[in-house]
Image: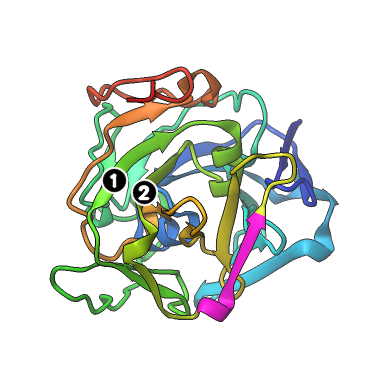
Amino acid sequence: MHEGRCLCGNVRYEVDGPFAAVVNCHCSMCRKHHGSAYVTWAVAPASGFRIVTGNDSIGHFESSPGLQRSFCTVCGSVLPEITPSGESVVVPAGNLTGDLGLQPQLHMFVKSKAPWFDITDQLPQHDEWPPAFGMQPVARAPVPTQAGVTQGSCLCGGVAYEISTPPLRFYHCHCSRCRLARGAAHASNVFFSADGFRWTRGADLVVDYALPGARFFGTAFCRRCGSDVPRVARERGIVNVPAGTLDTDPGIAATAHIFVDSRADWDTLGDDGLPRFAAMPPSR
């Protein structure tokens, strides 16, 4: 039995194991929805999946014909979804507690990989769906961009933003809060000065969730599709941008892995040469 939940804890669920497959997906839709470099999906029989609490807090967005993506309407965490056949449940592994009993087996949709992320492990890589899955990719129109400006948007396109100042820092964060919020192995967060940030559309669609008891931690997401979007802290002068939502290359790659002592049991990290810190890096 595996247990999972969203960041705020309103939605809790159980999945009977064992998992049949665990895969890392780099497609643009997953990156947009989770705001991360990629998402790790764990697949199990749908007959063993049940929502324990919070069913009325679950929102849905049809990202492509017949394919729904679920999220918590309170905190924005991505949640499991039953496949169109009804036979399997696909679970964002970052929601789960404990060991999956299986580590990721492959990377898929690497042709859509983010330009700021390098795959450094030895797992098999597939440009799109692995042939054994028998699935066809969904074509997505490119998002119009403007030279010289960092731009991003949510999965449904209702929320968009641009940043005119250079990035300050970029971390892959493995803390349990980020994993629950993004449903991924880690968050990929780029920080900018708030002075250069502006919403170009959809500011009224942005939900800001402050985690109770946390000094600064929270999430922001699109209420329509559940995608993570930038969280602006004007009082601190910074904006935390989920890198998976970027439509342009920010001109910087991650400089460190942080909170690695909190990483998931199934997260092997890979050998990318970046510094690793047990918690936050030492202040300069």
> Percent from the top left, x then y, of residue 167?
26, 50
Which residues make up the magenta segment? 203-209
**Marks 2,1: beta carbons within 8 A:** yes
The answer to whether residue 93 is visible is: no
Q: 126 or 94: which is nearer to us? A: 94
Residue flagged by tag 2: what amino acid is it? Phe
| Lower position in the chain sequence, tag 2 or tag 1 | 1
**123 shown above or below 282:** below
- Residue 36 lies in magenta, yes or no? no
Residue pointed to by mark 2: 191
Q: Is residue 99 left or right of residue 165?
A: right
Residue pointed to by mark 1: 168
Q: Could you classify mark 1 by the number of other residues whose Cα lies within 10 Å: few (under 14), some (14-19), or many (20 or more)? A: few
> Percent from the top left, x then y, of residue 254?
28, 38
Residue flagged by tag 1: what amino acid is it? Leu
Residue at 35% x, 48% y is 190
Q: Is residue 1 left or right of residue 216?
A: right
